[in-house]
Image (tube, rainbow, N blue to C red):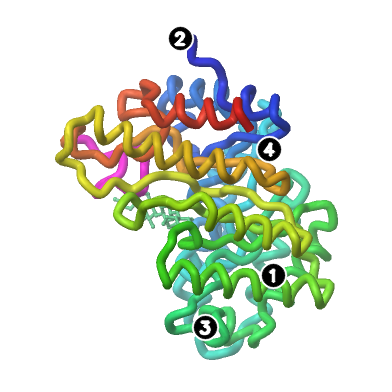
Amino acid sequence: MPMGSLSRVAAAGGRSFGTAVRPEQLTGDARLAQLVLDNCAAITPEIHFKWNAIEYAPGQRNFAPADALAAFAGSHGLALRGHALIWEQSTPDWALRRLAKGEGWELVEAHFAAMLGRYGAAAQEWDVVNEPIDTEQGVHGLRTTSFYRAGGPHYIERALHLARRLAPQARLAINDYSVDYDNPVDAARRTALLRLVERLKKADVPLDAVGLQAHLDLAKGPFRPQILRTFLADLAGLGVTITITELDVKEADRRAPLALRDARVAAEAQSYVATALEQPAVRGVTTWGLSDRDSWLQDAPGQAGARPERLNRGLPFDAALAPKPMYWAMRDAFAAG
Ligand code: G3I
């Protein structure tokens, strides 16, 4: 069967398909770069748009890797997702130290100005706030991050208004994880995310989209389509579009026969993507990498010496860049959607 292009099949149904990438993957491996070009209409910088990648030391911004990704997207006509302006885990230590004391919001303003000034037009959709939900230790469902302390309980509103001012054309999103499964934690997180979106929309805060990371996990299953269906309809009803931003599948048993493992991963991805595509507000799907070789789910991603049969197999292509059942499953889901 000819491989065909995931993005072309997705585009026929009015959807986009993309992947997360790191610049060294594109420059260091021509086959991977070709796989991206063959299959993707969009890319998300996996690491290099993050604050600690841009400004590891205060005031010394290194845009080179981010520029390379923006240029790759621009020269090949790919959409670009700006990921992520605010994320506690990718904030440089020097900034975290100030923000955690409840001061230094001007650092956030300077970072936004730098990023949106440079890439605000190049990237069509931005994760302005990444992972704001915490229903276990948070306050009213919000993670009490350093940004929460520095910007106050309405830091998300402030961040979105700031982003809109600096990039009036960009689509602005919040992006979060663990809203996929039928368990009390995910259920509480769905409710908290819906409440947050409702609050923002009611207050006319410039929020255009919600990103659902979709780091699927076979240990958390079974995946129940009806739960996602209802959640997506509730989100869409609040007037936002939805992007599946970081899809991959974490395996529960890497010792099972390979064919069975691949079938389990493919079934999970197909079920999830097919359900998501039923919802017209879902604009596209991005996987968090194309090849298992590069997945963050590996114990040592990209490192030689890892036993290939023990690698997590939760992306569309295997470590040798051959398509796996997950690839065909996603293609089928896009074709049907
Ligand atoms: O490149 C260095 C390498 O030289 C060094 O030996 C190694 C030692 O730790 O670190 C390598 O860099 C790591 C990089 O991944 C490449 O593997 C960074 O330390 C590590 O922080 C970085 O992690 C990334 C993480 O976000 C933090 O930025 C992951 O690749 C990336 O997949 C992950 O992506 C996040 C999304 O942004 C948000 N949602 C969850 C998702 C998974 O955590």
* Residue underneath mark 3: 144
Mark earlier in primary sequence (4, 2): 2
Determine which quarter of the picture holds residue 110: bottom right
Residue at mark 3 to residue at mark 2: CA–CA distance? 50 Å
Residue visible at 38% across and 27% down in the picture: 325
Tag nearer the camera, 4 or 2: 2
Q: Is residue 233 magenta?
A: no
Rendered location of residue 314, percent (x, y): 36, 40
Q: Secondary structure at mark 2?
A: loop
Residue visible at 56% across and 26% down in the picture: 6
The answer as to whether callout 1 falls within 8 Å of ligand 1 is no
Please identify the quadrant where the C terminus is shown.
top right
Mark earlier in primary sequence (2, 1): 2
Residue range in magenta is 293-305
Mark earlier in primary sequence (1, 3): 3
Q: Are marks 3 and 2 in contact (CB under 8 Å)?
A: no
* Residue underneath mark 4: 79
Please identify the quadrant where the N terminus is shown.
top left
Front-lying residue, 89 or 308: 308
Residue at mark 1 to residue at mark 4: CA–CA distance? 25 Å
Question: Disc 1 marks which amino acid?
Answer: Val
Residue 333 seen: yes
> For residue 197, which numbered disc appears in the image?
1
* Residue underneath mark 2: 1
Tag nearer the camera, 1 or 3: 1
Q: Secondary structure at mark 1?
A: helix
Decide: is 204 above or below 14.
Answer: below
Relative placement, left or right, of 210 versus 290 is: right
Residue at mark 1 to residue at mark 3: CA–CA distance? 17 Å
